[in-house]
Image: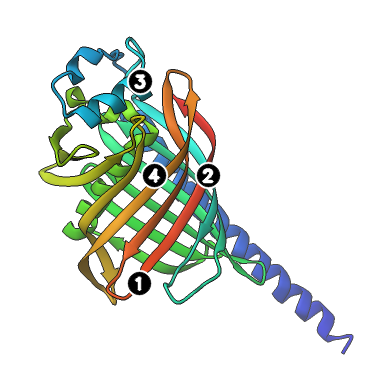
Amino acid sequence: MIKLIPVLLCILSGVMILFWLGRVTWNRYTARQSREIRTAASPEVHYVDLEEVNELPQPVQRFFHLVLKDGAAIINRGFITQTGGFRARPETQEWSKMEAKQCFSARPRAFVWEATISIGFGLSIRVCDSYSQGKGRIKAKLVSLFTVVDAHNQKELNEAALQRYLAESVWFPTALLPSQGVTWQRLDDSRAQATITDSNISTSVEFEFNDRGEAISVYSPSRYKEVSGKYERTPWKGRFSKYKQVNDYLIPQEGVVEWHLKDRIYPYWKARLGEIRYE
């Protein structure tokens, strides 16, 4: 037995080195993704002129007059952190702990979302969901080492990623202004549809506003969802709450995202924002 100890120590050391190399490689990959977005972001400085929203549908006007200040800087890029939970399957009742950070650019439109999701027994899955230059990509690895998802070069994924960008623009609301390429169409007294086009991809999301003007939900009746290796159009909704003033912008601090499946509503992501930086 004593003779086996050096062998076991060598094996243990080799496993530890393997995991360390996996973390280093993953961190380099996500850092490169984020660096490319920050570098490509426009350095030009523009300012909010709320006169441009005066012809928009009434609920959209209330939203912009609530969340923006006249003369505030147009956000070119930003950074947020999130803490919350994730559910990988609709059958799972418990939420896995999730910590994430996200950087985004408004010109050009891009984001990188990097998350660590705990799955028990000290193990975790690292996820990187990104959109840049009209391309979406989702990459996930178990303990930063074993690839479990690597989806890219698919038009359905590209559209879904751009749709996510549009929905999450409530966190950098100047990106929703008409001058930033968003068109608005009234649906009723509390809802309006926002549409953007990027890299020959056009997508829309329905925004719902409360009486105060807060955007309380976003909805798509047909967002692409991956099912057994294929993409199916599925109703999808995000809910926002707990608005807070951050510099010259009022943004929601909490959110829940859900798929509306045929037999159930499946919430799969929930989080609260932590650190928030704008440039």
SS at circle 3: loop
| Tag 1 residue | 264
Q: Going by the image, does 231 lie left or right of 117?
A: left
Query: Decide: marks 4, 2 in contact (CB < 8 A)?
Result: no
| Real-space Cα separation, disc 1 to disc 4, in angstroms | 30 Å
Q: Which residue is mark 4?
A: 112
Query: What residue is at 61 percent from the left and 64 percent from the top?
Result: 19
Residue type, label 4: Val
Label 1 packing within 10 angstroms: few (<14), some (14-19), many (20+): few
Q: Which residue is mark 2?
A: 272
Query: What scheme was used to colour the molecule?
Result: rainbow
> How far apart are the two marked residues, 1 and 3, measured between alpha carbons?
37 Å
Tell me which corner region of the image, top left, top right, bottom left or bottom right, holds residue 275: top right
Query: From the image, which quarter does the C terminus lie in?
Result: top left
113 and 245: which is toward the camera:
245
Q: Is residue 160 above or below residue 134?
A: below
Q: Which one is earlier in the sequence, the residue at label 3 or at label 4?
A: 3
Give the CA separation, mark 4 to mark 2. Answer: 17 Å
The residue beneath circle 3 is 68
Report whether 238 appears left or right of 117. Answer: left
- The structure residue drawn at horizontal position 42% and vertical position 62%, both measured from the top left corner, is 267
Label 1 residue SS: loop
